[in-house]
Image (cartoon, helix red, strand yellow):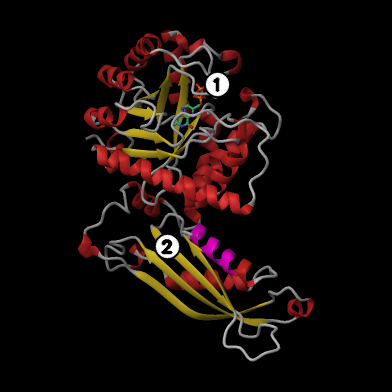
Amino acid sequence: MTTLREILPGLGERTLVMGVLNATPDSFADGPERGRWLDPGRAAERARAMVAEGADLIDLGAESTRPGATPVPEEEELGRLLPVLRALLDARLGVPVSVDTYKARVAEAAVAAGAALVNDVGGLSRDPAMAATLARLRVPVVLVHGGGRGGRPPGVPPLSAAEADGYVRRLRRELGELLERALAAGIERGAILLDPGVGFGKGVEEDLVLLARLQEVMPPGVPFLVGASRKGVAGRLLGQPPEERLEGSLALAVLAARAGAAVVRVHDVAATLKAVRVADAVRAAAGRGAEGRESGVEGAGAAAPRAAGAVALELRGLLFYGRHGARAYEREGLHPFRVDVLLELEPGRPADDRLADSLDYGAVARLVRSVVEGEPVNLIESLAARIGRTILERFSAFPVRGLEVRVHKPEAPLHHPFEDVAARWRWPV
Ligand code: HH2
């Protein structure tokens, strides 16, 4: 099976940019240009321009997936797709072309014609033949969560904290199941890009939660793609029509890159490329550069040999002083907080007896210190959560499987003798 790495050599080293080309009369994002790329000559010109702007691959679709779009019969989709695909291949773009479809027969015909990758916007669920077909085609695939379901209507109220937590848990479970289904069907791990499916069966509020918590949502060790360009979440908040959502789309591409997306799928290639370059540089400066990302792309978290075992690192009783507390006098002076951190590494890590292959516990301790000595909060629960999130964020590219943080407050304002007052924060929940 061809791996992603073979067709996308930069994968894991920088955020790759997938340029969108819709050979459709009704794609939501194309604005006045809608329908223009049904013409093979114009489509090839557009693809060439995107490659000149720096696109790492082109995603060609011939059926709109926007909420409420009319499904297109197979023959019609092929009738639009194949002439344009042939024109793109004849143009020798020098980058792979993926085909955006949920239909097994369309995927098969496109790969036979030369498409290098299948972007299954149905997430293996809209066409029962898709999983087996993809395994047989032996090309890399994008698997989109949400199965091609349309977005929820606008105006859904913000999710409460408990609803957001439940939603994140559901997404994580369903993405894990999607991955398992693909592997069980015979699609190899190194050929899979997962996609959380921004806007697919989700409203803007759900998209916001998903984008805010990408690292929790995406299964560790599997590269992922984010397609938020010009979608509701990028512009509805600002009241802009799809073709005017550049700034929102750039913000979301940067956030996705920062959260470790291997690929962003976008309409505005040149601008996105510049934005994610900067995001990548920031990410690298934070110590999460190519090295950490490679581990994700190579499928760290893949079924490790049993003998590899799993390591947990424990830091117990780290003592720092801060001003946290709900009472005014607690904010005035420093008082002690003891912190325990338990970090579970992916099985097989560290693979090598080198610090670079593990987590530097000195760096973890320094990070805990900066949080305890930083901005005061009222509750030790909040402090534990802040420490936990900061560690996950700082080591986002490192394959951590679990994290537990306990914050003890030995001088808690209690008028009774006590042994301990502590709060615990845990991830995954
Ligand atoms: N979004 C769209 C289409 N294909 N593929 C992936 N992997 N991820 C996405 O988020 C995604 C996708 C919808 O965007 P667009 O192609 O611009 O619109 P339309 O479906 O109306 O053609």
**C-alpha gap between disc 2 and disc 1:** 40 Å
The residue under label 1 is which amino acid type?
Gly
> What residue is shown at x 58% (from left), y 32% (from top)?
152
Q: Which mark is residue 68?
A: 1
The answer to whether mark 1 is within 8 Å of ligand 1 is no
Residue drawn 50% across and 41% down? 277
Report whether residue 12 is seen: no
Amino acid carrying mark 2 in the image: Gly
269 displayed left or right of 74: right
Q: Is residue 428 left or right of residue 10?
A: right
Residue 86 is one of the magenta-drawn residues: no
Question: Of residues 252 and 144, which is closer to you in this image?
Answer: 144
Q: Residues within 10 Å of mark 2 (few under 14, many from 20)?
A: some
Q: Are marks 2 and 1 in contact (CB under 8 Å)?
A: no
The residue tagged 2 is 402
Total number of numbered discs in the rendering: 2
Most common secondary structure along the magenta stretch: helix
- The boundaries of the magenta stretch are 384-394
Instruction: Report crowding for label 1: few under 14, some 14 to 19, many 20 or more residues within 10 A (C-alpha).
Output: few
Residue 158, given in percent of the width and then of the height, sits at 66, 44
In magenta segment, residue 385: yes
User: Element type at marker 1?
Assistant: loop
Q: Residue 166: image x %, image y %?
A: 54, 51
Rendered location of residue 59, percent (x, y): 42, 25
Quarter holding residue 268: top right
Is any part of residue 144 visible from this angle?
Answer: yes
Q: Nearer the viewer, mark 2 or mark 1?
A: 1
